[in-house]
């Protein structure tokens, strides 16, 4: 039991309490156990990781790399596969590259630990790199590292805009975010 709970705790967002609850629910419910086995088998049979962009492939097809309508000269770099899914759900028409993390010296995540070398292999003077990394300290460190490494080998390096989110109230916005929002303002359509 302890071994299974430890495995469940390896999933991000699941602590000891949640892992124990999941274990006992699976153990005491044959229908939940059977559904979980079915889902794991479906994942194993139908999903894999794309060797080019590190997004997922469904039935051996990557929705980025295998889509010929996408702009091959625009690559959006994100930290995690969940971020790649968000990009897929948006109107973005280019490709994606998943780093599988962010540089974090406290957790011993160095650039070599990430899929940065694979990104470098995909770029040339025709390609724009859009850095859509998290607006956290680690995301900024990673974005700056990548930008400094590739600035001379690519058409351009851009960063997602920062600013006030929809529903944001100025009274609760920090000064840096407000300054970014003002600096990155856009003209209204007439």
Image (cartoon, grey):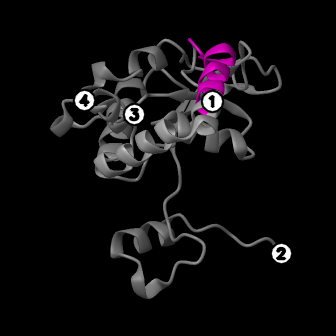
| SS at badge 1 | helix
Stretch in magenta: 36-51
Disc 2 to disc 1, how far (Cα)?
57 Å
Residue at image mark 2? 190
Decide if residue 129 is on the left or right side of residue 70: left
- Give the mark nearest the N terminus, 3 or 4: 4
Q: Residue at x 51, y 24 (%)?
A: 154
Q: How many circles with numbers are drawn on the protein?
A: 4
Quadrant containing the N terminus in the rendered view: top left
Comparing labels 3 and 1, the label whose residue is closer to the camera: 1
Which residue is denoted by mark 4 in the rendering? 109
Q: Are marks 2 and 1 in contact (CB under 8 Å)?
A: no
Q: Earlier in the sequence, mark 2 or mark 1?
A: 1
Provide the secondary structure element on which disc 2 rests. loop
The tag earlier along the polypeptide, 2 or 4, is: 4
Residue mark closest to the camera, 3 vs 4: 4
The residue carrying mark 3 is 147
């Amino acid at each position: 039991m302890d071994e299974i709970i430890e495995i469940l705790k390896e999933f991000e967002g699941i602590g000891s309490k949640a892992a124990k609850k999941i274990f006992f629910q699976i153990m005491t419910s044959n229908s939940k156990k059977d559904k979980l086995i079915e889902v794991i088998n479906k994942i194993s049979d139908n999903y894999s990781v794309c060797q080019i962009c590190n997004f997922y492939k469904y039935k051996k097809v990557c929705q980025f790399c295998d889509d010929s309508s996408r702009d091959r000269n625009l690559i959006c770099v994100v930290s995690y596969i969940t971020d790649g899914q968000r990009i897929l759900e948006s109107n973005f028409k280019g490709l994606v590259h998943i780093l599988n993390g962010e540089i974090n010296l406290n957790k011993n995540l160095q650039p070599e630990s990430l899929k940065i070398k694979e990104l470098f292999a995909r770029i040339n003077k025709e390609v724009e790199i859009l850095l859509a990394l998290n607006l956290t300290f680690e995301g900024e460190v990673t974005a700056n590292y990548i930008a400094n490494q590739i600035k001379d080998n690519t058409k351009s390096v851009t960063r997602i805009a920062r600013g006030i989110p929809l529903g944001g109230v100025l009274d609760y916005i920090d000064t840096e975010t407000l300054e970014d929002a003002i600096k990155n303002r856009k003209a209204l359509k007439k």
